[in-house]
Amino acid sequence: MRPSKSLRSVRSSRSSISMRLAPDAPRVTVEFEKLLPTACGKLNCPYTIVVQRNQQNDDFYRNLVGKEKRLSQKRIQSAKLPTERLQSENSTSPGSETSSAIKTSDAKDIVVINSIYDNFNALVEIQIKRLKNVPRIMLKVIGLLAIYYKNLTKLSIYQSKIDGYTIYEVRKIIESSLITNICLDGSWLPEGNYPILLDSKKITTLSLCRCGINDNISKIIASKLYKSENGELLTVLNLSSNDISDTGVKYLADSLRTNRCLKYLNLADNQITDEGAISLLNILKEFPLTDEEIISKRQRHIKFLRKEALYLQYMNESDNTSSKSAKKKLLGPAAFSVKVQNTKKGQLQDIKQIGVFHDPFQRENIVVRDGISYCTGNTSLCYINMAYNNVSFMTLKKLKSVLEYQNAKIKNVLETGLLKIVLEGNNLPLKCAEMSEISELLRKNLNRFSQKHVERKRSERVTLTL
């Protein structure tokens, strides 16, 4: 049976969204593999840049051509003579000639990076691996070229020696392009300036595996995750294989009291015990608010009301200018001035972002008992990985109570709750009543979320047809 083309059409439409957003942007006709070395050479880069092209095949493409390709290869190999097989094994592809030449040469001034393309021949990722020095001029050129590749969303620097200038250039690349996924796995930075990347308002995925992050750095990262404009779009945070203890986890747990954007948190292979794990799980259920949190919530509400008042003032001034259009034609533009033009750019930006007031401590999420305000908990975090730590049976009991609470309280369609938690490699029993109950509660959470998601999609289709 011929496979359906609906998934392919969805991918093509998704990949063309960014092109529709900027139709006036110039298109690049030169390949990235040729453009980057040429640009670095023009700017007197002290290294020879070599870009290797790689193809990224997704599951849809593998299922589409995987079986037929394997069968055809078996037929061809069985039909070949022994001499032809030796020639085919010794032959190299056009892209592997440069890689073999680079491996044989011991030149220290050669920098090799990989460009990853999807099935539609669109550049989606740039990979930099195992470099003793990441050239700053190369990152500057990548930042200049990235704006012309509208499907480029990921930049990876694996196991390379980086410094503060590298982090600074990566942040500039994020601000000037559509790259939102940053991976620095194994790239250790002595100063630990990784939280600078969270100053950008566009980053959504940050992976810092094996980067030597300790409690002090995790405290700075947690400060960026509070309810603020910085780091408000971050949904995936990978801090596995670092030196984070219970103190660092408590900092992250405090930030999750107000953060409702983070969905994925990986803390595997750290130094976390039951104390840190329980402090993190306590945020996923009902917790009391402090006086500082209540005051900060009121301050955010007042700030929103000021934006709303500014918006109403802007609308009134626009109505007045439209009523004076006849006077403008008679007296000329010199005698007519619009007060809105004198408004600060920051205020106009706030006007564009005006909407309904959303806050983690708004009235729908607050319960008052005995004069104490309680928040219903963080129900946005849906994945936690605490594998290969030092948690024990006490964490299992706390996890069971959290899942029971979320199954009973969550009714909003947009709230997910905890859908998966990984605890392998810890000092836990292989089989017990709590483990089976936790698995059943996670299954119920997943079924509830999937059912509500399907219902929401159906309601959206009905509204579109109407």
Image (cartoon, rainbow, N blue to C red):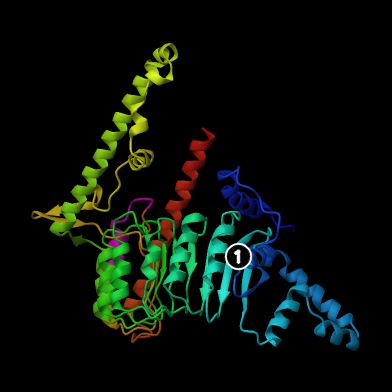
176 and 125: which one is in front?
Answer: 176
Residue segment shown in magenta: 400-414
Q: Residue at x 43, y 16 (%)?
A: 332
**Whether residue 347 is visible:** yes
Determine whether 371 is above or below 183 in the image. above
Left or right relative to 80: residue 361: left
User: Which percent across, then down, holds residue 263?
Assistant: 39, 62
Left or right relative to 190: residue 117: right
> Is 460 within the magenta?
no
- Which residue is under mark 1? 43
> Is 405 within the magenta?
yes
Q: Secondary structure at mark 1?
A: loop
User: Which percent across, then down, holds residue 246?
Assistant: 26, 78
What secondary structure do most residues of the magenta stretch adopt?
helix
163 and 389: which one is in front?
Answer: 163
Instruction: Single out the residue that lies furthest toward the left.
Output: 370
User: Which percent across, then down, holds residue 439?
Assistant: 39, 72
Q: Residue at x 50, y 38 (%)?
A: 462
